[in-house]
Image: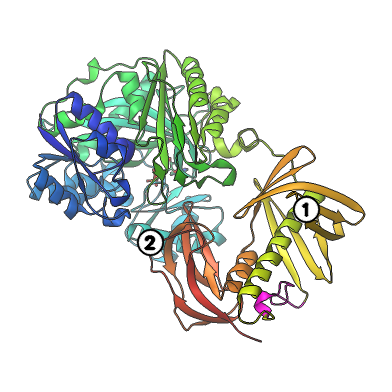
Amino acid sequence: MFKKILIANRGEIACRVIKTARRLGVKTVAVYSEADAGARHVDLADEAYCIGPAAASESYLRGDKILEAARRSGAEAVHPGYGFLSENAEFAEACGKAGLVFIGPPPAAIRAMGSKSAAKHIMGKAGVPLVPGYHGADQDLGLLQKEADKIGYPVLIKASAGGGGKGMRIVEKAADFADALASCQRESKASFGDERVLLEKYLTRPRHIEIQVFADTQGDALYLFERDCSVQRRHQKVLEEAPAPGMSQARRNSMGEAAVAAAKAIGYLGAGTVEFIAEPGKGKSAGTFYFMEMNTRLQVEHPVTEMITGLDLVEWQLRVACGEPLPRSQDELAISGHALEARIYAEDPAKNFLPSTGRITHLSAPAESRHVRIDTGVRAGDAITPFYDPMIAKLIVWDADRPAALARMRAALDEFQVVGVTTNTEFLARLIACDAFASADLDTGLIDRNREQLFPAAPLAGDEVLALAALAELLAIERRAGERAAASDDPRSPWGTCDGWRLNQDNHHILVFRQGEREQAVTAHYRPGRYELDLPGGRRTLTGAWQPDGSLTAWLEDRVLRANVVQSGQTLDLFFRGARYRLELHDPGLHEIESEAHGGTLAAPMPGKIIAVLTASGAKVTKGTPLIILEAMKMEHTIMAPGKGTVKDIHYKVGEQVADGAELLGFELDKD
Ligand code: ADP
């Protein structure tokens, strides 16, 4: 066994690896970014080295600095965890060159699986079933379009180099193909530096079932059964379980054998996961499975496999990495009971799962036992930053069967309490309880199909609530405009007025309020001393003001409405007649008004990363011209020109992280 290993990762997985290493008497070396100096993984390790600033590209992705830390510490091997450099063949190679054991497969196996297209070629040859599709090298638009037509819609475009659910587009019809392809290529280029794509038949209700495999240096390989990861949100796993409900022994064997064949086909070593999508339901095709991709590392969800097999996969990784044979043979393995994992995230399900950053002021978790396991890298007092994945913990439960495991999960989620950041625990609790999940009617569309149960309808905002929300916003715009005018050299500057004159001839603002999935637009026309509002129920006159007690009073025609309104950023929490309404102000037009008035700059509507700069300083543009693409919440947001004008200086480069409200570029509107 190794005497000392370095863990080239952070967060829960670094802590997880340290735990096993310690049990085996292996010393551990942590690496950390400046933002992580006080992190749990740093405290747990025997020694730790700072490898650079917060941004992952300057720290956890810096193979050279990590190898330097390994050299200084005298570590013999490097465990890459998942994410970061775990599937980076160059890094694995560099470890070898530096005389270190990379705890993972050989670089050639990583390369073989690194491209989804290449992986499919290899798997097809090894006799593993593939989803009907196109994965050729020729990327000509005409050809791709023809292939897509041939496959039949809906078609899924995937980035060849993709991962983590990124770089995927579902195309419903031939006419949408070219646009979706361009957007997919752009995202792939920005995220993976490679714009090649592959096409697949899009299965409408598939299950995601993956097989854990392990291989040793003796050439043996086996499978540690399956995990069902069908419960996903935007192609990202939310809940995982093992075994897969409804899996027959025969199907398990054939999938397991296909996965082992896959591992053997590429000379695999260590832990790997072969992902399949399977047809759901009960019919003839039910359970038919197709190879999707192989992940050449330990998966986030490996604990459910550990819970049902009683094995420690990190221990297996360390053993096979130092040349020992697999600790067990296939026929010595058995499944016991049922395990579930829930990923607890700092995110706000009500805000479309927007990551919630901030300091965790309070964290209490259920006690760990034979039934409950918590893998985490954070403690109370730690901050969730925009630099890394906002996962707080993995909550894993085990019991004799699925219903009992579900009950465990329900109780454990109730006990998981976090203050300081918003979390998804209540959403997870609803998910566990929803009929489809409870009855194991699983497929990747489960969350979308059960939105009503999962995102309980807040009372819908009617005309009165919309009028109050519009009033709060219009008064806020007026107040900000007044403050700016007072602060400027010319208090009568048109930049300080807020009668909508700049936007159009008719002096109006369009405010779009989003409530859950629903969007409602309210048009406010400026009239002297009042507004005319176009509400869903018709045009109404509105006036109103904030009261000294902080409440808001509105006169909507002949009715007096009173509400408490809490405004934070784009969110309005409105308490009206005993009900609570949460409205999201969603209006690119509003950002335009705001940003142009902020001294002629355009600001980031939320924290994110710049993925494309589509303009240059000095460029003359018209209203709506895309200027910058920001990636936030794992989606692209396009910042557009608020009107006809000239781009001044651009403040950020592609790849840079920006804070909420950061000024992205200077912009001068044409005067006429
Ligand atoms: P990534 O590497 O980004 O995780 P995958 O290829 O593993 O991408 O796919 C992620 C998820 O996307 C799958 O778990 C599944 O839910 C969905 N998916 C992938 N391929 C298909 C397909 N052909 N039809 C339907 N859904 C798919």
Residue 628 can be seen, yes or no: yes
How far apart marks 1 and 2 lie (CA) works out to 49 Å
**Is residue 498 inside the magenta stretch?**
yes
For residue 545, which quarter of the picture?
bottom right
Vertical order, 266 against 142 (above or below)? above
Queried whether the magenta region covers residue 473, the answer comes back as no
- Circle 2 — which element? helix
| Numbered disc in front, either 1 or 2 | 1
Residue sitting at x 45%, y 42%: 236
- Residues in magenta, as a range: 494-505
Dividing the image into four quarters, tell me where ligand 1 lies: top left
280 vs 254, left or right, is: right
Q: Does 145 sit left or right of 18 as displayed?
A: right
Going by the numbered disc 2, the residue's amino acid type is Ala
Q: Give the image's coloring scheme.
A: rainbow
Looking at the image, is 555 positioned above or below residue 40?
Answer: below
Q: Position of residue 109 (x, y in %)?
A: 20, 44
Where 182 falls versus 54 (above or below)?
below
Where residue 121 appears, as percent x and y from the top left, is 29, 48
The answer to whether residue 637 is above or below residue 505 is above
The disc, 1 or 2, on the residue closer to the chain's N-terminal end is 2
Q: Which residue is mark 2?
A: 190
- Are circles 1 and 2 on residues that touch, CB within 8 Å? no
